Amino acid sequence: MRRRWLRLMMRCGAAGMLCCALLCVGGCNIFGAVASKAVGPTKVQAQYTPPPAEPLLVLAENYRNPSDTLIDAEQLVRYVSRQLEEKKVAPIVDPNRVFELRSSRPAKYRDMSIADIAREAGAKQVIYIDVVQSGIVMADASEMMKAMISTRVRVVDAQSAATLWPPNAAEGLPIVHETPLVRVKGSVTEDRLRQQAARGVAERIARLFYTYTPEFETRE
């Protein structure tokens, strides 16, 4: 009877040691998962915070070939401006001021610098988006296609014309977005794909300037 009891105790002890070993191996992962649920997802900090009381202009263009990306650039300006306004980043200058200036005085507009345009629109700072490339990309030997936009983003002071951000990239921070490959049919058109690409890159650009929680914004 005593021997049987000892054997039972030894089996229980071995099982306990195995449980402890498994807990040591997976404990950190389990604890991390529980902590993540309890605390919530980590916030992504703004890369640059504009002065909250100073008028901010969003300006987008392809200065090398302005007409090639005009529609994409205008959509980009409206999407970014709207998102920054919703997040109350700063007083956002109405983009129509720049559109009207460009259409009413095209010769003057062509000779104006980024800072000149910002001052004319009444802004203190400008988020300048250089639209490097945009368009539709066809997949090889198929009817599948996607839209893509490649940009460089920087913040310029309207008075000094100095680049305020990013500090170590004078041409701007590269931001690229492309849609998934799809077959164009029915409601899926090239224009629709270009709009999706513009919205996607606009969201990435706007998020550079405010702190956000990824999971929360995805649910929204």
Image (cartoon, rainbow, N blue to C red):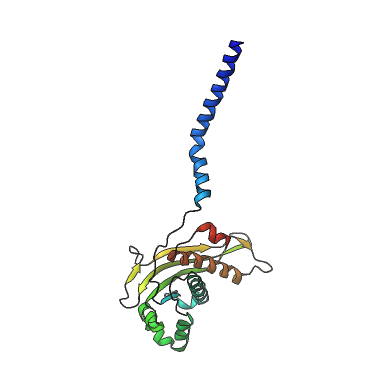
Residue 108, percent from left and from top: 39, 87
Q: Which residue lies furthest to the bottom in this view?
A: 104
Name the residue at the right extreme. 186
Q: Which of 214 and 163 is in front in this view?
A: 214
Quadrant including the C terminus: bottom right
Estimate the x, y position of residue 165 in percent, counting from the top left: 36, 67
Residue located at (51% from left, 58% from top): 214
- Give the percent coordinates (x, y) of residue 1: 62, 10
Residue 86 versus residue 22 in the image, above or below: below
User: How many labels, in total?
Assistant: 0
154 up-or-down from 9: above or below: below
**Left or right of 133 on screen, residue 112:** left
Name, please, the residue furthest toward the front: 2
The image quadrant of residue 186 is: bottom right
Estimate the x, y position of residue 96 in percent, counting from the top left: 49, 82
Viewer-side residue, 79 vs 40: 40
Q: In this view, does 40 lie above or below 53?
A: above
